[in-house]
C-alpha cells in the first residue's frame, strides 16, 4: 500500500476518533478541531494534485524491478502539426513510445491515431474532453467521459486501450472507482520537463529530463499543446533526449510492455 494511502486511512481514523470523542466525552477545543480539519483537507488535496503519491488510485510511475530501457510518453495529442515530427524522430532513433491521446482530438484526426499505432507505438487515453476540473466531477460524468474516449479509440484502431493518464495528473476517489470498473491501468511518470507550458524552453526541458533517464524511467512529454495554441517545447527537446538515451544505451520501450512483464512475473510467482 502506498504510504500516502496509509496516511489517508490513518487520518480518516483519527478524524472519526475526534468526532466520537466530541459526541461521547466532550467537544474538542475549537482550535484543535480547526487544525485537524485543515490538516485533513491539505492531505486530501495532496492526493488530488500529486498523482505519484498513489493516494486514491494505484499508479505505475516506473518500470518493474529489473526493467530495462526508458518509456517515453506523450500527452495531449494528436496534433497534425507536431505529432508527425515526433513520430519521425522516434523512427530515426528506433524508439517505441506511448501516446496518451485526447479523445476529442482523436475524433478530429483519426488518421494520426492510426499512424501512431501503425508505427508500433502504444496508445492510451488522456480522457475525452481533457477537463481541467475532472477530479471534481461526479462518478457518472467521469465514467461517461472515459467510456466515450475509449469507444472513439476502439473505433479508430480496433483495440480498446487499457492505459489511462488523468488530465492534468489529478485524481479523486470517484476517478479511482471508475478506473477500477473500466479495468484501466493508470500511468504516471518518474521524470517530466514541464514542456506543456507555453513559456517552456527546449533547453530547460531537456535539462530537467536527461538526469532522470535510467532503466525503468517513465518520461512525461507532450506532442501537442492542450489547446493547440503553441508548439510544446518537448518536441524541440526530443532530439537531445533521444541522443542522451543513445549515449547511455537506453532503449525506448512501450509502457504496456512493462505491464505485460509484470503480469507474467506475477503468474510465475
Image (cartoon, helix red, strand yellow):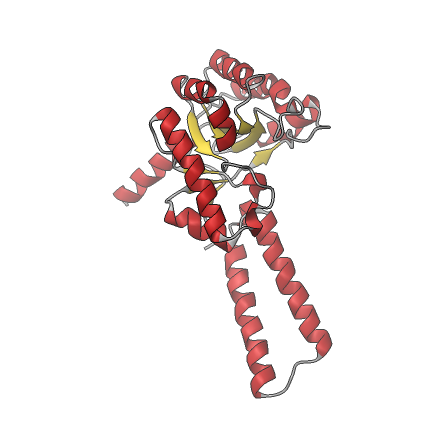
What residue is drawn where x is 37% and y is 44%?
Answer: 183
Q: Is residue 155 above or below residue 12?
A: above
What residue is drawn where x is 33% and y is 27%?
Answer: 158
Quarter of the picture containing the N terminus is bottom left
Q: Looking at the picture, how far across and down is residue 12, in whole percent? A: 54, 67
Q: Looking at the picture, how far across and down is residue 22, in whole percent? A: 60, 82
Q: Is residue 106 above or below residue 59?
A: above
Q: Nearer the viewer, residue 156 or 232?
A: 156
Q: Is residue 70 above or below residue 34?
A: above
From the viewer's perspective, tell me whether residue 61 is left or right of residue 36.
left
What residue is drawn where x is 56% and y is 32%?
Answer: 220
Residue 219, picture quadrant: top right
Q: Looking at the picture, how far across and down is residue 218, in whole percent? A: 51, 33
From the viewer's perspective, tell me whether residue 91 is left or right of residue 204.
left
- Residue, far left: 268
Quarter of the picture containing the C terminus is top left
Q: For the image shown, how many numbered marks are present on the structure?
A: 0
The answer to whether any part of residue 64 appears in the image is no
What residue is drawn where x is 41% and y is 36%?
Answer: 150
Amino acid at each position: 500500500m502506498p504510504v500516502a494511502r496509509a496516511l489517508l486511512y490513518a487520518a480518516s481514523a483519527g478524524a472519526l476518533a475526534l468526532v466520537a470523542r466530541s459526541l461521547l466525552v466532550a467537544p474538542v477545543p475549537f482550535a484543535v478541531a480547526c487544525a485537524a480539519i485543515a490538516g485533513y483537507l491539505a492531505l486530501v488535496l495532496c492526493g488530488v494534485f500529486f498523482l505519484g503519491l498513489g493516494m486514491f488510485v494505484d499508479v505505475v510511475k516506473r518500470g518493474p524491478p529489473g526493467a530495462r530501457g526508458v518509456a517515453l510518453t506523450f500527452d495531449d495529442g494528436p496534433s497534425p502539426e507536431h505529432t508527425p515530427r515526433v513520430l519521425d524522430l522516434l523512427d530515426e532513433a528506433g524508439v517505441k513510445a506511448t501516446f496518451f491521446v485526447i479523445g476529442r482530438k482523436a475524433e478530429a484526426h483519426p488518421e494520426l491515431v492510426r499512424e501512431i499505432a501503425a508505427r508500433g507505438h502504444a496508445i492510451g487515453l488522456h480522457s475525452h474532453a481533457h477537463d481541467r476540473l475532472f477530479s471534481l466531477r461526479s462518478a457518472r460524468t467521469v465514467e461517461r467521459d472515459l467510456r466515450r474516449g475509449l469507444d472513439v479509440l476502439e473505433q479508430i484502431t480496433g483495440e480498446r486501450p487499457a492505459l489511462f493518464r488523468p488530465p492534468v495528473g489529478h485524481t479523486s476517489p470517484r476517478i479511482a472507482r471508475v478506473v477500477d470498473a473500466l479495468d484501466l491501468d493508470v500511468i504516471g511518470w518518474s521524470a517530466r520537463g514541464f514542456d506543456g507550458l507555453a513559456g517552456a524552453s527546449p533547453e530547460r526541458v531537456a535539462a530537467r529530463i536527461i538526469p532522470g533517464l535510467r532503466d525503468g524511467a517513465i518520461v512525461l512529454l507532450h506532442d501537442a499543446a492542450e489547446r493547440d495554441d503553441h508548439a510544446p517545447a518537448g518536441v524541440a527537446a526530443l532530439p537531445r533526449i533521444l541522443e542522451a538515451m543513445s549515449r547511455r544505451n537506453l532503449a525506448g520501450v512501450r509502457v504496456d510492455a512493462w505491464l505485460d512483464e509484470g503480469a507474467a512475473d506475477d503468474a510465475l510467482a
